[in-house]
Amino acid sequence: MNVNLKLNFLEADKVNGVQVVVFDGEFDKAGFAEVKDELTNFVKAFDLKSLVFDFGKLKYINSEGIGFLMEVHTHLIQRDRKLIVVALNANVKDIFTAIGIADIVPIFDSLNDYLKSATK
């Protein structure tokens, strides 16, 4: 069986209060099913300031993936934390802009761009 979506949880940057999760593949129904439990448990236990989803290797996201992102965003906001998205490809960025996610969740071109803005 092919894996549709892989997650790579990078080491937490406790100095900056940031944890990065790299998404690789397609965040569609099959991909979401593969990572849902692991990602949900991770988000529930997350205790730093900012959770960064790195979509640099994400090829596609559908409405189910977008719905989950909004759930994560809401959950983190309720706990005084935030979701940041970095490294969107042009297609995913267009989708986020068209449906208004770019107005809700901060989006940066790279992790470095986010870290620079966070230290200002």
Image (tube, helix red, strand yellow):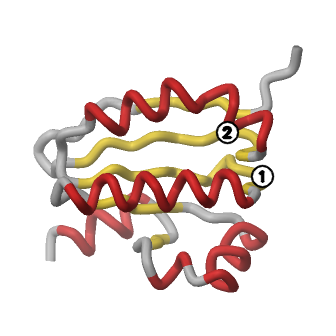
Please give left or right for residue 37 compared with residue 5 in the image: left
Tell me where residue 96 appears, x and y as whole percent.
63, 75
Q: Which residue is mark 1?
A: 59
Q: Quadrant of the N terminus?
A: top right
User: Which is more toward the observer, 120 or 30?
Assistant: 30
Q: Earlier in the sequence, mark 1 or mark 2?
A: 2
Q: Which mark is residue 71?
A: none
Could you tell me which secondary element the residue under label 2 belongs to? strand
Tell me the amino acid under the disc marked 1.
Lys
Whether residue 72 is situated above or below residue 120 in the rendered picture: above
Helix, strand or loop at label 1? It is strand
Tell me the quadrant of the picture where the C terminus can be found.
bottom left
Considering depth in this image, is 73 or 106 the residue closer to the camera? Answer: 73
Q: Residues within 10 Å of mark 1 (few under 14, many from 20)?
A: some
**Amino acid at dot 2:** Asp
Expressed as whole percent of the image width and height from the top left, the position of residue 12 reads 26, 35
Determine the residue positioned at 72% across, 60% down.
63
Q: Position of residue 7 (x, y in %)?
A: 57, 31
Relative side of 52 to 35, left or right: left
Judging by the rendered image, the residue that carries numbered circle 2 is 24
